[in-house]
Image (cartoon, helix red, strand yellow):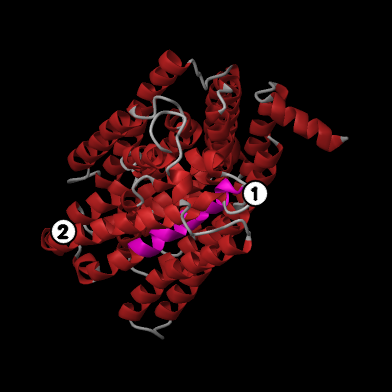
Amino acid sequence: MGVIARQSIKGALANYLGVAIGFFVSFFVLTKYLTQEEIGLTRVMVDAALLFSSLAQLGTNASIVRFFPYFKDNRNNHGIFGLSVLLPLAGFALFALALLIFREPLVAAYSANSPLVADYFYLIPMLTFFALYTTVFETNASVLLRITVPKLVREVGIRLFNLAAYLLYGYGLISIDVFVWLFCGSYGLAMVLNLCYLLSLGHISFRVDWRFLKGKGDAGGTRGVQMLRYTLLMTATVLAGNIPLFNSLFLGAKAGLALTGVYTIASYIANVVEVPYRSLGAISRPVIAAAAREGRWDEVKRLGREVSLHQLMVSTSILYLIYINLDTLFALIPNGQDYAGGKTVVLILGLAKVVNSSFSVCTDILNFSRRYRWSLLYITLLTAMAIGLNSALTGGEGAIEGAAGATLIAYACYFVMLFRELQVHLGVNVFSWGQAKMAVIMFAMTVAWLAWSEIVEPALGMGLIVAAVVRTVVLGGGLLAAMYVWKVSPTVNGMILRGKR
């Protein structure tokens, strides 16, 4: 896992640099200069664009990862990059047509409770196009095992450009119309930067090698037909990673932008939990795809267990450290009392992020296997559950908690089905004793936190910030020590020992 480890670490550093900037922007700029409704507006627009762009991809990103080992050569990779541009373009054209046809009912759904969304609905197609090709170019870089720069663009570049827009608007230098245009433009800039980086890597040709596509595939039919069949089947499966997007869209329509703004701040906190998997997943997928293609299922099983265990270790640790300091965070941010009602949302949505990031490797393994067609059934069930639960739980009181709960329940049911599929039909089990050890450790650390907050901290009488620092050092250090002493991950322990030498 040398390449995976190196690129994952670099990508994770880029992600956490983005998290640091995002933390400052979200909690000390957004909460100060934007109203809850304006925060909700930006969230609904971005989530709508991400959801629509994931559908417009027509499964291209999944097929790039799966079929790149078939196309790979020492020159232009037989034009697979050209296909990755053409197919999403067709998908975007279909999306734009559908949006034109259904524009009136969509606008009407938001007009009553979220009029700002209705006012700027016309910008969503442009934002969708930018988000679509930002992701396409990023995926192309990932199959070349180069994810650091695209991660910097997504996690740092977009946030810095948005920060400038927030400050200009906050100080009254631009109108809200200009602000929304600049906000959308940040994704256009990211698209252009990713394209430039992809071209700089070499071995890239957007000229499709039609002769190679007409060659015989290894599963019957031509390579082109085989790839097209897989691509169209994967169209629905991309929804698996975008289920949380339904939350803000339902909240905006049914509960209004103010509550959506509260949910947005809470989700920004919870999103930190899955940051490591953005790098680990991006770099591990091509390796798993290559192993599956070559029939090395023992290697697939090993990779699946390692990715799942290490992601569980990291995500649960991050959620734990966040939640024990949540009251301090809301006390420090501007207008924190307006957003403190989202504390329960952070926990529920954080648990959903732990489940999704720890077991998303199951989706990858199924997609790269001979039974990839079954992904369509499972994603259809997941999507139906997410829509049904959001519709039922986002109305009335507890709307934001209901939205977060809908995501957690949907993911839990989805992965239970996937576990059975992989175990029964592929002989792959991503569980290990390390995950059981992590569950015991997290239970013990939760008890320790409750005892610390109820007994130790009141006795010490420390100030707000000092208490947070001491709490983090003591409890966080205890968590790390427990994982090391109990040898939850031999791989991690080995890296630590090598580091000591």
Q: Which SS class for mark 2? A: helix
**Left-right relation of 43 to 459:** left
Q: CA distance from mark 2 to mark 1?
A: 48 Å
Position of residue 103 measured from the top left corner of the image (x, y, whole percent) = 15, 62
Please name the predominant secondary structure of the magenta segment in the image.
Answer: helix
**Left-right relation of 489 to 357:** right
**Residue 236 or 27: which is nearer the viewer?**
236
Residue highlighted by disc 2: 106
**Residue 333 or 7: which is nearer the viewer?**
7
Residue 405 magenta: no
Position of residue 152 measured from the top left corner of the image (x, y, whole percent) = 58, 59
- Figure quadrant of the N terminus: top right
**Left-right relation of 297 to 249:** right
Q: Point out the tag, 2 or 1, that comes first from the N-terminus.
A: 1
Residue range of the region highlighted in magenta in the rendering? 128-144
- Figure quadrant of the C terminus: top right
Instruction: Select label 2 or label 1 by which is in front.
Output: 1
Q: Which SS class for mark 1? A: loop
How crowded pointer 1 is (Cα within 10 Å; few <14, some 14-19, many 20+) is rated as: few
289, above or below 84, in the image: above
Identified at 31% across, 79% down, the residue is: 177
Residue 132 magenta: yes
261, above or below 353, in the image: below
Say whether residue 370 is visible: yes
Badge number at residue 74 = 1
Position of residue 30 measured from the top left corner of the image (x, y, whole percent) = 42, 66
Q: Disc 1 residue type?
A: Asn
Say whether residue 48 is visible: no
Identified at 42% across, 60% down, the residue is: 133
